[in-house]
Amino acid sequence: MDTATLTQPDPTHRAGPPEPAPAPLPGPGTSRGSALADRGRRVLRGPEDDAAWARPALLALLVVTAGAYLYNLTASGWANAFYSAAVQAGSDSWSAFFWGSFDASNAITVDKPPAALWVMALSVRLFGLGSFAILLPQVLMGVGTVAVVHATVKRRSGPAAGLLAGAALALTPVAALMFRFNNPDALLTLLMALAAWATLHAIDKGSIRWMALAGVFVGFGFLTKTLQVLLVVPALGIAWVLFADTMIGRRLLGSLAAVGAMVVSAGWWVAVVELVPASMRPYVGGSQTDSFLELTFGYNGLGRLDGSEVGKVGGGGGGGFSTDVGVLRMFDSSSGGQISWLLPAALLLAVAGIAFRGRAPRTDARRAAHVLMGLWMVVTALTFSLMQGIFHDYYTVALAPAIAALVGMGAAEAWERRDRLSGALVLSAATAASAAWAFVLLSRTTAYGGWLRFGILAVGLAAAALLLLVGRLHRTGVRAVAVAAVVASLAGPAAYTATTLATGHSGSIVTAGPSTGGGPGGMRGGAMPGGAPAGGPAAANGTTPGATGGTATGGGTRGGGMGGLLSATTPDADVVAALQADADSYTWVAAAVGSQNAAGLQLASQQPVMAIGGFNGSDPAPTLAEFQADVADGRIHYFLAGGGFRGQNGGSTASSEIGTWVAATFTEVTIGGQTFYDLTQPVAGSAS
């Protein structure tokens, strides 16, 4: 592409190119086939005022992203079996689908709202239960997020800037991980990007309806991962109030409309959960009082900020999972390789972009975009860095769209001024910072030897030096320098992303890229070299590597560390046969302490399994009395021995009480190397 087309020709451009006129309906002299063909050509060509290469380049970016994310997809098996089990339940029962229940018999929900589960369960209903059907929606969300970021940046800074932003997002290692994994973060990230896109449209048009649409996206983000979506809200609100192309009264009305739409789009489901009697729905997993509001503002809310989550496992900052609390957490040995490759450049380009637009009118669209994306990045990064509660490195995927957009827009803004010292200095500094930081990150692993990091550093520093002279170079030299700067900036994350794509991931704690010695216990949680099976449909011989803390092998041994907290395993054929035998006679074919322990049994047998105590085994669901009543009514067949965790921060002891009572009351049986208690066979003389 011609580097002169990196941005729109007019640097004061406010609202982007006009929307293309709709294709005319076929008339008397026009065949329907030719009309459809004409529309197809319009899709491939794009808007009339776009460069000829712009639309084909976008389509190529999306196709390559989809192909890369689909590659080796099923190597992760069930991925996070906790959510896969809930998806299986939702594909069997519409009631479990609505509530986000872990099991089709509706004993307890997962500890998140169900929006992400809805999408996956619909995919399973369409394609059948399997790894591909569960993970495909995340791939589509990833491609969609790349498209949204591209569109957001292109509208303000031109097609080449949009392509740079889209490629930067697609090559972010944590994005390549989470857009191929079944945690809620993929949908959350897409909805945050859509909310930013809608808000910038609202700012351009001064439109209250577009702000209401942004509120809808935030509301569904709440139904995906509760309060985390609110990290983007300050950026949306401030940008709208400061820069919208309308009077202050309408800006205030737009703010109210956005808040109202957010409350309605999220609140309808919350109201149903809170108003329906507890006896008519599953227990709210992750709460201590069977309340979704408590879950939202406690375990998944303020508790994450101050470390007071009731029932969490482990102590210290990060809840035993991440202890590097501080403003540099995004750059540390654990999170750095996930998200921070372009973070220094994004910070620099955000400041420069705002400064470059300093004399523009209040409603300047580019400045609004710089401020919105910059606030999104800063607020989210600081929250993740300073939170004292449970933090996992994969949370940082929520930063990826903002960082990518800032890089694309900021580079375009500086490129327009490349003949001036200010623009050349910004381009040079951003390139040097990206290359130098990539060198540091690559020095933390031995996966690529020394050639990659030294090559990136050499090319990046050379490009940075030549960018200071870019105004004096021949056109061919300018192109070469621009390509070298992009390659030096993206080669490091591209290497990490390639490693991520070639590796299966399973369990509750997963990270992208090769081992760096960071993460829980100095291990890369859930990484399975060579696409090893992950307890899903592709698993062979019942062997499943655990996420951390050891390997779970065949013969029914539970792995994953912390009593099965981190990952589920695949039981062998004897266990599956026992669970499926006369399954219709029971509400739950088995019960197990902790959701991951229950997930392996449920996914293998495709029968409901009760997860006692929810994810951590620390929820009071069921109580001992409730469990005893279920057993007396003949609703549960087996109880899986073991499970449960130590060092919990409060929470219920009901699971321990249940385990003690079962062991003293019922007959122990060994099936396929695993120890169960047959709840239909009391020990002689016991009072069952």
Image (cartoon, grey):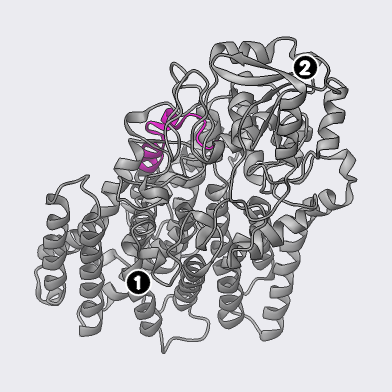
Quick one: 205 or 636, which is closer to the camera?
Answer: 636
Q: Is residue 45 visible?
A: no
Mark toward the start of the polypeptide (2 vs 1): 1
Mark sitting on residue 410 = 1
Under tag 1, what secondary structure?
helix
Q: Looking at the image, do the residues carrying marks 2 and 1 touch, with CB atoms under 8 Å apart?
A: no
Q: What amino acid type is highlighted by mark number 1?
A: Gly
Q: Amino acid at mark 2?
A: Val
Q: Quadrant of residue 500?
A: top left
Badge 1: how crowded within 10 Å, few (<14), some, or many (20+)? many
Q: Secondary structure at mark 2?
A: loop
Taking 423 as reference, is 300 above or below it? above
Q: Which residue lies most toward the front here?
A: 685
Q: Is residue 295 magenta?
A: no
Residue tagged by mark 2?
683
Q: Is residue 508 left or right of residue 628?
A: left
Residue drawn where x is 48% and y is 51% of the image: 145
Left or right: 454 in relation to 349: left
Q: In the picture shown, does residue 48 fall above or below 590?
A: below
